[in-house]
Amino acid sequence: MRAHGGHYYVHAGQTEVDCTLRGRLKQGRRPSDLIAVGDRVRWRPTTEGCGIIEEILPRQRVLSRCPPPPRPPVEQVILANPDQVVVVFSLRNPPLSPFMLDRYLVACAAAQLPVLIVLNKADLLEEDDLELIALYRAIGYTVLTTSALSGEGLEALREALRGKVSVLVGPSGVGKSSLLNALWPELDLEVGEISTYHDRGRHTTVVACLLHPEPGTYVADTPGLRQFRLWDIAPEQLEAFFPEMAPYLGRCRFKPCTHLHEPGCAVRAAVERGEISELRYESYSKMFTYGF
Ligand code: GDP
Ligand code: ZN
């Protein structure tokens, strides 16, 4: 559930056990690479409420990121075994930036993590937002519209989180804490606390901990995870992370094709025919040109 100074708090049935790592596990490895929040473990009880972790089970998925430069690119595990990434943006205040949303979606696709899009502040929804919502649904994403204020969409969100390990990401101020508080008031998360401290990249560690608001449901709290920049993605890999491009890949005259300027490009032709949205294509070309 969380780690602190060599102690690992393991959720077991109805209780939480304060565990240390068995010495043999630690040999030649830094604990930060060895065990992470979200890991499934085998443990042995020692004294009342305490235990020793004997084994860390293989990870099915992992949410990790690259520490900011000048640190060398060593994988930093933020959360082991997330079932889904919930990408939260607000429709208004701040307004939805499709480019920023697309960066999160590409990052999730590259990390092979299932994603759920939540568009919050639906109480502020305006007519032209509907087109954007429809666009992402047409591509195949699940999009929930919610309002922590009016309660709209909250039951659907609760249902989507139920029985899973989820991590909520998204810019600050979009209402992530408000949504969790609205679903489970007992969590009592701080709202409206906009900190720019972590944005400066001074903190190289992003510590996650798991909240457990109802049986079987886990939600990761990742206070430092503002910039959702995971690994760098090479420009030529990007096409694979735009699902709507899939039907056109391999059909361009030039192979490989960047889909930016080559004649006879099947992707650009699809944009011109309106089969791929211009907004999404713009995101692709911006990421290709200026880096992910
Ligand atoms: P976080 O940084 O993503 O965790 O966002 P917060 O939960 O701290 O919310 C940021 C601000 O948005 C606060 O002032 C909230 O009261 C406000 N807010 C959150 N959800 C909603 C919503 O559904 N509608 C409206 N109008 N405001 C909201
Ligand atoms: Zn092309």
Image: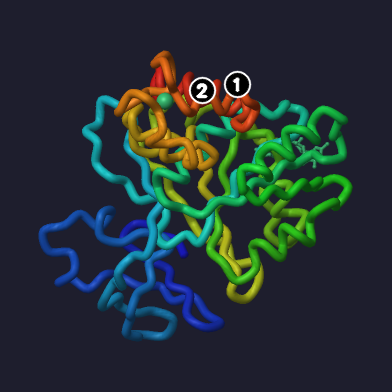
Amino acid at the residue labelled 1:
Glu
Residue 22 lies in what quarter of the image?
A: bottom left
Say which residue label 1 marks. 272
Coloring basis for residues:
rainbow
Closer to the camera in the image, 78 or 286: 286
**Residue 224 in sight here:** no
> Are circles 2 and 1 on residues that touch, CB within 8 Å?
yes
- Callout 2: CB less than 8 Å from ligand 2: yes
Closer to the camera in the image, 188 or 129: 129
Direction from residue 76 to residue 153 in the image, left or right: right
Direction from residue 37 to residue 165 in the image, left or right: right
Inter-mark Cα distance, 2 to 1: 6 Å
Q: Quadrant of the C terminus?
A: top left
Residue at x 32% of width, y 30% of height: 234
Amino acid at the residue labelled 2:
Arg
Ligand 1 - quadrant of the structure image: top right
Say which residue label 2 marks. 268
